[in-house]
Amino acid sequence: MENTRILYLKNGCPWCVEVDRYLERNGIEVSKIIVSSNRDAMDEMVRLSGQSKAPTMNWDGQILADFGVEELVPFLEGKI
């Protein structure tokens, strides 16, 4: 199993801010990559998720794309 926990974010994205704050409040550590000004990171996010919306998360190879906290909570269930 991969040991990859990456959160892809865009500047100015309210859902990205909401998700980032939730993770921080709950002590959930992930690597964060801003894709707004990083073409390689954007391409990687699109390759993994098949879309270009943020936030997108890669949690040990499982991808959650274009989500808010409401979708994140059940996605993380059993993972943390």
Image: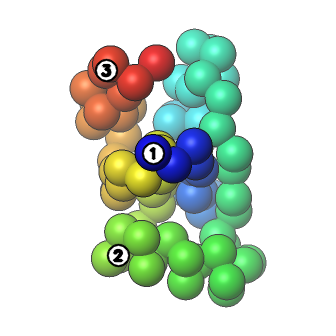
* Residue 74 occupies quadrant: top left
* Residue carrying label 2: 51
In-image side of 73 versus 12 (left or right): left
Viewer-closest of 26 and 48: 48
Kind of residue at badge 1: Met
Specify which label sits upstream in the sequence, 3 or 1. Answer: 1
Picture residue at 60% right of the left edge, 23% below the top: 28
Considering only vertical position in the picture, is 28 above or below 44? above
> Badge 1 is on which residue?
1
The residue most toward the right is 37
Task: Provide residue 31's location: percent of width, then percent of height.
Answer: 69, 45
- Between the C-alphas of marks 1 and 2, the distance is 23 Å
Q: Nearer the viewer, mark 3 or mark 1?
A: 1
Q: Which residue is drawn at 64% across and 16% down?
A: 27
Percent coordinates x, y for residue 73 in the rendering: 33, 25
Mark 1, secondary structure of its residue? loop
Q: Element type at marker 3? A: loop
| Amino acid identity at mark 3 | Glu
